[in-house]
């Protein structure tokens, strides 16, 4: 009886461990995407710190942040909605082209981020 209990307990621990391991396998693509979105948010935060009051700069940054958050939620679900990509890219482009107080470094960083967004968009199963 004691041997049976030990065997059942060991089997339970083994199955629990296998189930837990199967739930979240590290995926380098997801990690890279998360870092890209985090980096983009950090660059937009830098743009927001120099936003000129009463010019719409801060609202453009806020809109871009909202679009990024919406896009990341969809991508995390595996939903590569091309319209959402386009809206997000346009929102970040608006910040780059219309916020006149951005430093050259911030413009360069946001431009690099846009390139990474476009690469991610091309990985979409719906991309043509």
Image (cartoon, rainbow, N blue to C red):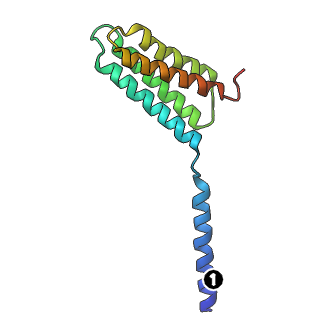
- Across and down, in percent, residue 49 comes to 29, 21
Residue 83, above or below 98: below
For the residue pair 64 and 43, the one nearer the viewer reads as: 43
The structure residue drawn at horizontal position 63% and vertical position 75%, both measured from the top left corner, is 11
Q: Residue furthest left?
A: 53
Residue 34 position, x and y percent, is 50, 37
Residue 108 position within the rendered picture, expressed as x and y whole percent measured from the top left: 43, 18
Q: Residue furthest right?
A: 128
> Which residue is located at x 64 percent, y 87 percent?
4
Assign the N terminus to one quadrant of the image: bottom right
Q: Say whether residue 77 is left or right of residue 56.
A: right
Mark 1 Cα shell of 10 Å, populated few (<14), some (14-19), many (≥20)? few
In this rendering, is residue 75 above or below 86? below
Q: Nearer the viewer, residue 8 or 104?
A: 104
Q: Report the residue marked by disc 1.
A: 7
Q: Nearer the viewer, residue 82 or 50?
A: 50
Q: Position of residue 36 (x, y in %)?
A: 49, 32
Secondary structure of the residue carrying numbered label 1: helix
Eyeballing the image, is 18 above or below 114? below
Q: How many marks?
A: 1
| Residue 107 drawn above or below residue 34 | above
Q: Residue at x 54, y 17 (%)?
A: 87
Name the residue at 45% across, 11% down: 94
């Amino acid at each position: 009886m004691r041997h049976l209990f030990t065997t059942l307990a060991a089997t339970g621990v083994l199955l629990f461990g296998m189930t837990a391991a199967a739930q979240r396998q590290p995926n380098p693509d997801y990690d890279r995407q998360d870092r890209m979105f985090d980096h983009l948010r950090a660059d937009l935060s830098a743009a927001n710190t120099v936003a000129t009051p009463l010019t719409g700069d801060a609202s453009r940054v806020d809109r871009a942040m909202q679009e990024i958050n919406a896009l990341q939620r969809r991508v995390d679900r595996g939903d590569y909605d091309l319209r959402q990509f386009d809206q997000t890219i346009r929102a970040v482009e608006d910040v780059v082209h219309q916020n006149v107080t951005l430093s050259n470094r911030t413009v360069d960083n946001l431009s690099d981020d846009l390139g990474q967004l476009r690469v991610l968009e091309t990985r979409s199963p719906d991309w043509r």
